[in-house]
Image: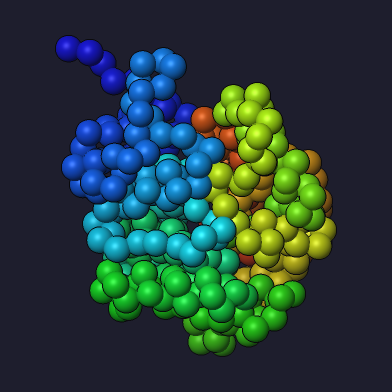
Amino acid sequence: MTQVPTKTNLHPRNLHRERYDFAQLIKTSPELATYVSVNVYGNESIDFADPAAVKALNRALLKQYYQIKEWDIPDQYLCPPIPGRADYLHYLADLLAESNGGNIPRGEAVRVFDIGVGANCIYPLIGHAAYGWHFVGTDIDEVALGNAQHIVAANDLNDAIELRLQPSSIDIFSGVTYADEYFAITLSNPPFHASLAEARKCAQRKWQNLGKEHNKHKKPVLNFGGQSMELCCEGGEEAFVTRMIEESASGGEHCLWFTTLISKSTSLPQAYSALKQAGASDSRTIEMAQGQKKSRLLAWTFMDKQQRREWWGKHGKK
């Protein structure tokens, strides 16, 4: 019996550690067949430089593994890699387990705040399917939020996923949270480029990594898409994360853990400095990787261990 290679850099509970079973995925979502071919290594695959192919793969993965029967995003909006997004959620589950006697908490009592939910609504979809958590997702883009709402309604998830428009392009928590609300954890995949020019350079590097640099007749594209507000903000991820940390300090009693992805290791020193200034009681940096892409999860809290246990006993269970 041939052993299927595993992606050992993914979280042990990640359902995507083995090579994609394209035969099964096509059976689940027949449209994917259009984009599958045998690559130079003799394996079935898709062209990951083709946004339409990536979208079709995502639709099949969501349907097969997470029972999402309807999912689509407008052209040019961010189409995220499913395995990496699932990894983030599994590490969050491990973090929450620390205050729950080592047991991963499941069910609607676990409320998660998703900053920048996007048109794809990917974290709430996976997080609810995997753990039964309930989500509040926010975004500054009305088109993205409208598409996310369509996905939520089409999959009968209105009771599990609430979406809110953030009216400010600067604020993160202010304007979209209520004084009597409590969340177990927040998550964010911030825009990590400082400009569109920087984003295009990143796209060029991706094309080179995918072996596409020899094709001079095609312009490099962001194979996972993305609107300008999804990809970049003034000051890049360093400025965004610094604002998030500063704002989080005023809501330290209302959230057990605040977290964000950090794409660039060079952003960490400023984040650590901001955490110290904000008075965080504890912080963690968890290394993550998917394929050639490396990132890290930064988590922080304003409660000590005893306070976290007490908070969980009061707000984390029903």
Asked where in the image residue 160 lies, by quadrant, the reply is bottom left
| Residue 111 in picture, x, y percent from top left | 42, 70
Q: Quadrant of the C terminus?
A: bottom left
The residue that appears at 37% across and 39% down in the rendered structure is: 35
Image point (36%, 56%), residue name: 126
**Residue at image point 69% right, 81% down:** 168
Examine the image and state in which quarter residue 242 appears. bottom right
Task: Name the foreground residue: 225 vs 124.
Answer: 225
Asked if residue 168 is positioned above or below residue 31 in the image, the reply reads below
Indicate whether 110 appears above or below 38.
below
In the displayed structure, does residue 22 sit left or right of residue 137?
A: left
Left or right position of 72 against 299: left
Q: Is residue 88 visible?
A: no
For the image shown, how many numbered marks are present on the structure? Answer: 0
Give the image location of residue 15, x and y in percent. 32, 40
Residue at the far top: name it: 1
Residue 308 x %, y %: 51, 63
For the point 75% across and 66% down, the residue is 243
**In this picture, residue 194 sits left or right of residue 7:** right
- The answer to whether residue 196 shows anywhere in this view is yes
Decide which of 34, 265 is in the foreground and name it: 34
Give the quarter of the figure containing the N terminus. top left
Going by the image, does 282 lie left or right of 18?
right
Q: Position of residue 31 (x, y in %)?
A: 29, 48
Render colour scheme: rainbow
Furthest residue toward bottom: 179
